[in-house]
Amino acid sequence: MQLLLQGKPFTLLPQKALYHEEGSLLIIADVHLGKANHFRKEGISMPLNAQQGDYLNLKQLIDKISPGKVYFLGDLFHSDYNYDWHHFEALIGSYTGIEFTLIKGNHDFVDVEKFERLGLHIVNDLIEDEDFIYSHQPVTFEHSKLNIAGHIHPGIAISGRANQSARLPCFYLHRDVLLLPAFGTLTGLCIMDRIKTARVFAVLPGEVKQI
């Protein structure tokens, strides 16, 4: 789905990511790789292949879009160093022509040096350009830029006929903040309020639709 942000065209992708074609920039929030192993260390039983789909989805998305740059808006690797890191290392290492940047989130526990050895640029707080501020958590500011952020894992509850209901991930645009849905599968949803001043874009199978 196409959407103008600050007068610039973006695509809201059903893969739960945002793409700015003019800047060849793919923006992804809250992948939470390694989270299954993190749970196992805490004694929570998880299937061995619990996050294989996240790696596959990430690779398929990058291959399809072929961006020049990728911004990860925090919580990329939700664990300290563990076996899952080798999968992540192989994935990132398979792309030599893409500039990867991670804006650190509150669950990015791996040492910065390990990310940097893979060629990722690490930013502690935010990235700011002429029109946008990219951050993990939403930020408060006093100018006309749009904040594109993650962290919240926004979702929307919808109801239909015969008392049917569903909870869907969504892009949530309110005032000067666009919240991106969490990319990863082990993330949960924060159900957002349906207020008149907000624009809600639900992620459906194969499409994004404003509701």
Image: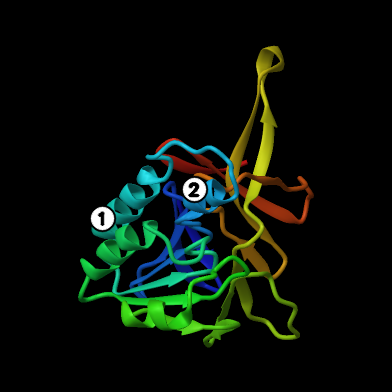
x and y, in percent, of residue 179 in the image: 62, 60
Q: Is residue 136 above or below residue 58?
A: below
Q: What amino acid type is highlighted by mark number 1? A: Lys
Q: Is residue 47 left or right of residue 21?
A: right
Which corner quadrant of the image does residue 132 belong to?
bottom right
Q: Residue at x 38, y 56 (%)?
A: 84
| Count of numbered circles in the view | 2
Sort mark 1 into few (<14), some (14-19) or many (20+) by Cα contacts within 10 Å: few
Q: Secondary structure at mark 1?
A: helix
Q: Which mark is residue 36?
A: 2
Q: Is residue 32 above or below residue 192?
A: below
x and y, in percent, of residue 21 in the image: 35, 68
Q: What amino acid type is highlighted by mark number 2? A: Ala
Q: Is residue 92 above or below residue 59?
A: below
**Which image quarter is the C terminus in?**
top right
Q: Residue at x 37, y 40 (%)?
A: 49
Q: Residue at x 39, y 49 (%)?
A: 54
Q: Is residue 66 above or below residue 192?
A: below
Q: Nearer the viewer, mark 2 or mark 1?
A: 2
